[in-house]
Each structure stands twice: as structure tokens, then as C-alpha cells.
Image (cartoon, grey):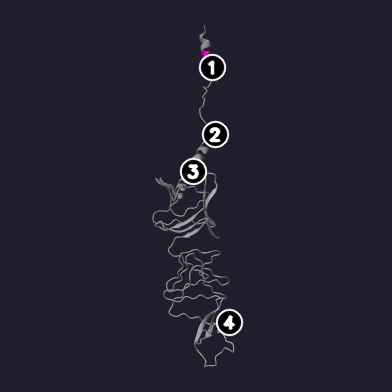
């Protein structure tokens, strides 16, 4: 058993020692660093929020889209000028109702149609050098669906009622021209000319040249030939004039000594040449046949 003195001594020893206190938390420089990082994080959050709001305002973000870009039920709608730096893939591109579609490029605008193997089928290029189209066939139709122009490897078809050539030199064809009708404009003359070569008009059933309100002139440098293989050539007019026909001269023995005559007859040589001969009581063509030699 512990005596009374021992108990009193133990109590005195315990009372003389100070009680120990354990602190919980962050204190000192660690606490100051934590507060600094929290303050810095709040500042960064505010800056980020302000930049996000500014970007949304500048880019004009809305519920329907961004800026001039609107997302509708029919697709994507762009308002104003738009620039694409990368390829644009779309099923259909069209303008707003009542407004034109405008495509602009600093070099050229190309429209390519390819197949599943990425092979070029049709190409349309508009650039500074001109307008180029590549394909099997090219067609131009009116609003009613009437064919106005068509071109392929075999032929070129002009379906308009009138083909007008405005060049000063007219139309130049390196090969033959096939047409059922050649007609000039009203009150203007029709002129077919070959400056350096011959002009040939050929038809299996005949050629009709008609001028209802004017004259017909056929001018050539060497020969003008009218030929009919199976039929005839008819000159039907109230007056037929053969200008500049040579005049035959009879020999001195067969010449008449009468007065000067002004009446002539037209003679034909065996080679088809025509000449004039002074008319007499009978034919004088045999007398003046020296032109045929």
C-alpha cells in the first residue's frame, strides 16, 4: 500500500509539470502560401471567365449558331461574305431567296465532278485566262427547256432560230457547210465570197437562187460555169444581155460593100464560145468563125 507521504509527493510532481497542447492546422509560411495560391486561382478563374465572355461576344455565339453561321432545319446558313481556307464539302450550295450567288477568287474557280475512283469526269474552270469546260457533252437550254446550243465530239448543234455572227470577217469554215437555207437579214444583201479559191455550190436535186426585191450578181476572175448533167439551164427574163461579146470579122472576099450595119446575130462555136456577127440576108456565123479558132 502506498503511504500518505508517497501520494502527496506524486501529486506535487504532477502538479509541477505543465500540460502539453497539440495544435491542428497549417500555420506560418505554409498558411500564407496557401492563401496566395487560392487568390491566384481566383484571379485566373476571373480572367478565364472574362475571356470566355469576350470570345462569345466577338464571335457572336448564339443558340442558333456562330456569327454569320446559322444552323437551321434545312442545313447551314451563311449570311454575308464567307471565306474558306480549306476544301468545302457540301451536297447543295444555293443563295437566299431573291439574292444572287456570288463566287469570287483571286485566281480561278474550279468545279470538278469525279467518280468513285476519284477520276475526273467533268470540269468547269473560270480563270484569268478564260472559261474552260471539259466533259463528254456541253448543252445550253432556255428557261422553257428548248435546246439552244449543244456540242460533243461528233457535232455542234445550234438550236436557236437565228445564228448571228458579229465579226468583221464573218464565219470561216475550213470544211464544207451543209444547210437547207441561206438567207440574209431584211434589207441587207447576201454575199458568198471566196477571195483566193473557188466557190462550189452542189445539191443532188438543184440549187435555187432567189432575190425577190433586188439583183443577183455572180462575179469571178477566170470562169463562171453553169452545168446541168441531166437537165437544162433556162434563162427566163424579159431582157437577157450578154455584155462584151467578141465580134467576128469576115474575110475581105466575103464582106459586103453595103452601108454599115447595126444589127448583129449571136453565134455559138463548137466549143461553146459566143460571139457577135454582122447580120445579113442569111446566117453569117460560118463566115465569121475565126473567133472560134
**Residue bearing the label numbered 1:** 13
Asked whether residue 85 appears in the rendered view, the answer is no
Per the model, the C-alpha gap separating discs 4 and 1 is 176 Å
Say which of marks 3 and 2 sits in front.
Answer: 3
Query: Which is more toward the observer, 38 or 72?
Result: 72
In the rendered image, the residue lying farthest to the top is 1
Say which of marks 4 and 2 sits in front.
Answer: 4
Q: Does the segment drawn in magenta span residue 12?
A: yes
**Residue bearing the label numbered 3:** 48
**Residue bearing the label numbered 4:** 291
* Sequence-first disc among 3 and 2: 2
Q: Main secondary structure of the magenta part?
A: helix
Query: Which is more toward the observer, 128 or 262?
Result: 262
Per the model, the C-alpha gap separating discs 1 and 2 is 38 Å
Magenta region:
8-15
**Residue bearing the label numbered 2:** 30
Per the model, the C-alpha gap separating discs 4 and 2 is 139 Å
Helix, strand or loop status at disc 1: helix
* Sequence-first disc among 4 and 1: 1
Per the model, the C-alpha gap separating discs 1 and 3 is 63 Å
Say which of marks 4 and 3 sits in front.
Answer: 4
Helix, strand or loop status at disc 4: helix
Amino acid at each position: 500500500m502506498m503511504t500518505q507521504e508517497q501520494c502527496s509527493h506524486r501529486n506535487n510532481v504532477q502538479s509541477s509539470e505543465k500540460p502539453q497542447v497539440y495544435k491542428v492546422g497549417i500555420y506560418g509560411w505554409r498558411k500564407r502560401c496557401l492563401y496566395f495560391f487560392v487568390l491566384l486561382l481566383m484571379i485566373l478563374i476571373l480572367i478565364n471567365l472574362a475571356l470566355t465572355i469576350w470570345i462569345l461576344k466577338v464571335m457572336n455565339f448564339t443558340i442558333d449558331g456562330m456569327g454569320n453561321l446559322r444552323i437551321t432545319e434545312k442545313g447551314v446558313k451563311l449570311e454575308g461574305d464567307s471565306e474558306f481556307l480549306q476544301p468545302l464539302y457540301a451536297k447543295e450550295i444555293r443563295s437566299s431567296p431573291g439574292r444572287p450567288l456570288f463566287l469570287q477568287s483571286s485566281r480561278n474557280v474550279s468545279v470538278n465532278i469525279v467518280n468513285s475512283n476519284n477520276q475526273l469526269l467533268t470540269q468547269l474552270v473560270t480563270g484569268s485566262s478564260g472559261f474552260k469546260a471539259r466533259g463528254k457533252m456541253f448543252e445550253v437550254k432556255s428557261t422553257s427547256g428548248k435546246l439552244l446550243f449543244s456540242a460533243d465530239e461528233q457535232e455542234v448543234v445550234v438550236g436557236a432560230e437565228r445564228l448571228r455572227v458579229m465579226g468583221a470577217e464573218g464565219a470561216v469554215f475550213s470544211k464544207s457547210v451543209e444547210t437547207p437555207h441561206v438567207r440574209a437579214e431584211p434589207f441587207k444583201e447576201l454575199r458568198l465570197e471566196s477571195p483566193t479559191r473557188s466557190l462550189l455550190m452542189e445539191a443532188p436535186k438543184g440549187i435555187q437562187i432567189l432575190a425577190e426585191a433586188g439583183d443577183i450578181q455572180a462575179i469571178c476572175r477566170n470562169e463562171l460555169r453553169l452545168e446541168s448533167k441531166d437537165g437544162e439551164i433556162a434563162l427566163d427574163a424579159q431582157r437577157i444581155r450578154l455584155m462584151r461579146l467578141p465580134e467576128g470579122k469576115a474575110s475581105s472576099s466575103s464582106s459586103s460593100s453595103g452601108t454599115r450595119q447595126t444589127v448583129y446575130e449571136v453565134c455559138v462555136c463548137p466549143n461553146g464560145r459566143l460571139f457577135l456577127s454582122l447580120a445579113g440576108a442569111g446566117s453569117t456565123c460560118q463566115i465569121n468563125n475565126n473567133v472560134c479558132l
